[in-house]
Image (cartoon, grey):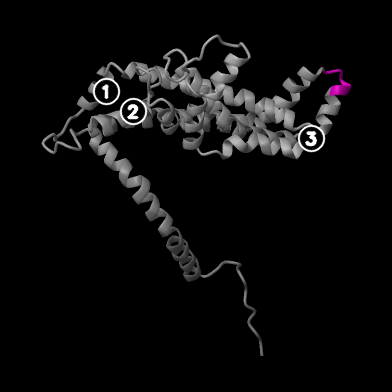
């Protein structure tokens, strides 16, 4: 009696695939709902408020505004200063974090006694919450009882205490310095991981060829840091540009609007003037700006990936 051999095609039944798809959709549903409620709905509401007159304490202020909110924001006398301060704040912070983070990573990558302790000490600022760091530095920089002014005057660096956060010429450099102090460990961690992944044979070959330490750094180290540098720089450009709490805790945008940035201006529109329409318009402008930054990042990232593959 002939037996029929069953041929296995290696393909699962359609019903099994549908069951898997349904299970995946059910498993992801809570996350999608969470994102829709936490991010999707507020984003849509901001876009709606952008083109309408909305006031938190005056319900009579309502109706379609068109582009009026954008015009009022651009016509604000503090808008230009906020844009300039945002650029200075972002550029100064990112450049400082990158430079100090890279130097710290190079030093921590050396095999020295107590290396683990030095690494832990370097990462401590990143563990401090922003609010705590800002308030602590504000106390330390106080011209009356702050330890920073006390030490500077005691060792003859300055003749009299400096009001770092109350002087319009010192305020922005000071908040940038504090932000760099807190954020550079993130760069250090990233760079240190990339440095430890570089094969030692490359340095030995470059040294045999007579390359100086500087040439080895330029020709061997930096090319291997391009990918991680691209990622963390663009991430921190966006993070820093939209940062609100650090400046607000230390200066609240003062003195005399010397440190006001676009997020601070949005807060003043919404929580001081209760003008949700203008706040939403400026938020939309920042959303467009950060989206353009992401597009630039994506293009550079894709180009870098093509160079690595090629």
* Inter-mark Cα distance, 1 to 2: 10 Å
Q: Is the stretch drawn in magenta largely helix, strand or loop?
A: loop
User: Given this view, does label 1 or label 2 mark the residue nearer the observer?
Assistant: 1
Q: Do the residues labelled 1 and 2 touch (CB within 8 Å)?
A: yes
* Inter-mark Cα distance, 1 to 3: 53 Å
Q: Are marks 1 and 3 in contact (CB under 8 Å)?
A: no
The answer to whether residue 96 is seen in the rendering is yes
From the viewer's perspective, tell me whether residue 93 is left or right of residue 206. left
Residue 287: which quarter of the image? top left
Residue 265: which quarter of the image? top left
From the viewer's perspective, tell me whether residue 269 is left or right of residue 17. left
Q: Residue 124, percent across and down?
A: 62, 37
Residue 47: which quarter of the image? top left
Residue named by callout 1: 73
Residue named by callout 3: 199
Q: What's drawn in magenta, residue-wise?
A: 207-211
What residue do we see at 13% from left, 34% from top? 61
Q: Residue 14, percent across and down?
A: 48, 68
The answer to whether residue 310 is seen in the rendering is no
* Inter-mark Cα distance, 3 to 2: 45 Å
Name the residue furthest bottom: 1
**Tag 1 secondary structure:** helix
Residue named by callout 2: 285
Instruction: Tell which circle, 3 or 2, labels the residue nearer the N-terminal end.
Output: 3
> Could you classify mark 3 by the number of other residues whose Cα lies within 10 Å: few (under 14), some (14-19), or many (20 or more)?
few
Q: In which quarter of the image is the C terminus?
A: top right
In front: 190, or 150?
Answer: 150
From the viewer's perspective, tell me whether residue 93 is left or right of residue 256. right
Q: In which quarter of the image is the N terminus?
A: bottom right
**Please, is residue 155 above or below residue 267 in the view?**
above
């Amino acid at each position: 009696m002939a037996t029929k051999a069953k041929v296995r095609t290696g393909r699962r039944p359609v019903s099994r695939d549908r069951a898997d798809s349904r299970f995946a959709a059910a498993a992801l549903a809570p996350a999608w709902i969470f994102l829709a409620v936490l991010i999707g709905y507020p984003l849509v509401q901001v876009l709606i408020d952008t083109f309408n007159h909305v006031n938190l304490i005056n319900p009579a202020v309502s109706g379609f505004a068109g582009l009026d909110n954008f015009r009022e924001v651009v016509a604000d006398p503090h808008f230009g200063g906020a844009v300039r301060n945002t650029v200075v704040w972002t550029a100064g912070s990112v450049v400082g974090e990158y430079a100090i983070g890279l130097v710290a990573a190079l030093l921590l990558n050396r095999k020295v006694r107590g290396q683990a302790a030095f690494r832990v000490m370097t990462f401590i600022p990143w563990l401090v919450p922003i609010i705590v760091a800002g308030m602590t530095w504000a106390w330390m920089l106080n011209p009356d009882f702050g330890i920073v002014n006390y030490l500077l005057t005691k060792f003859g660096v300055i003749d009299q205490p400096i009001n770092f956060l109350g002087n319009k010429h010192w305020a922005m450099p000071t908040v940038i310095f504090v932000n760099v102090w807190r954020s550079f460990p993130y760069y250090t961690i990233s760079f240190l991981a990339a440095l430890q992944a570089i094969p030692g044979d490359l340095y030995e070959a470059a040294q045999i060829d007579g390359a100086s330490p500087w040439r080895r750094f330029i020709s061997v180290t930096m090319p291997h840091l391009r990918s991680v540098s691209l990622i963390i720089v663009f991430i921190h450009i966006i993070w820093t540009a939209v940062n609100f709490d650090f400046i607000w805790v230390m200066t609240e945008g003062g003195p005399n609007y010397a440190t006001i940035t676009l997020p601070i201006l949005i807060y003043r529109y919404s929580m001081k003037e209760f003008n949700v329409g203008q706040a939403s318009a400026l938020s939309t402008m920042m959303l467009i700006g950060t989206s353009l930054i992401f597009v630039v990042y994506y293009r550079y990232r894709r180009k870098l990936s093509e160079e690595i593959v090629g």
